[in-house]
Image (tube, grey):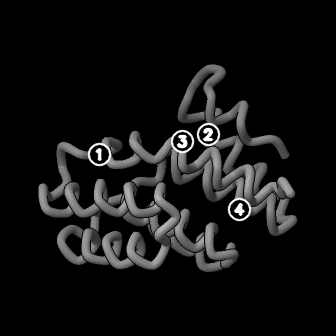
Amino acid sequence: MFTPSRLFLAAALIALPGLAQASASAINADSQRLTLDANAQLSARQSVAAADLYEAALAADPKNVAAYIGLGRVYESLGLPGKALSYYREALEVEPNNLDALEAQAAGLIGKGKLPQAQLNLDRIRKVCKSDCAAARRVSC
């Protein structure tokens, strides 16, 4: 059965290769490598292994936004949307205008029925994009 969370997870897995590139220039090389390995594990549906690698990536560099987003995706895949939202929030604390984090958080909020909060994310996405962008089109409140 295709539920909104499963569709969101499928879209997230397609987007994973780009996540590690988001702020790559400022991120520790070991943390980047661990994040790429974690992305591969998550794509292979090895959520526990992916979570361990994302945690290691964050230990190597706590400013690795892609690792926070990856952990959020892990917890989405495990059916723990509240925990996923906490990691998207942490990603946004590091990089407030990160489109991947804003989009993932908005989707999670929609899934929990928190439409006014999701609308705030959509407004932020539109402000960051300054024009029509894919992230804004994918988030529908």
Residue nearest the observer in this picture, 62 or 44 = 44
Q: Circle 1 — which element?
A: loop
Decide if residue 111 is on the left or right side of residue 124.
right
- Disc 2 to disc 1: CB gap under 8 Å: no
Q: Residue at x 35, y 63 (%)?
A: 38
Residue 19 in view: yes
Quick one: SS at disc 4?
helix
Which residue is located at x 40 percent, y 43 percent? 17
Q: Comparing marks 2 and 1, which lies closer to the viewer?
A: 1
Q: Mark 3 or mark 2: which is in front? A: 3
Q: Position of residue 123 (x, y in %)?
A: 70, 41
Does the CB distance between marks 4 and 3 fall below 8 Å?
A: no
Kindly check if marks 3 and 2 are in contact, taking CB atoms under 8 A apart as contact: no
Classify the position of the N terminus by image quarter: bottom right
| Label annotation for residue 23 | 1
Image position, residue 77 (x, y; %): 62, 68
Q: Look at mark 4 in the image and give the residue it sits on.
A: 108
Dot placed on the residue nearer the N-terminal end, 4 or 1: 1
- Whole-Å distance between the Cαs marked 4 and 3? 17 Å
Indicate which label's residue lies in the foreground, 1 or 3.
3
The tag earlier along the polypeptide, 1 or 3, is 3
Q: Earlier in the sequence, mark 3 or mark 2?
A: 3
- In the rendered view, does 106 fall on the left or right side of 18? right
Counting residues from the N terminus, which is met first, the one under dot 2 or under dot 4?
Answer: 4
Task: Name the N-terminal-most of marks 2 and 1.
Answer: 1
Residue picked out by circle 3: 14
Secondary structure found at label 3? helix
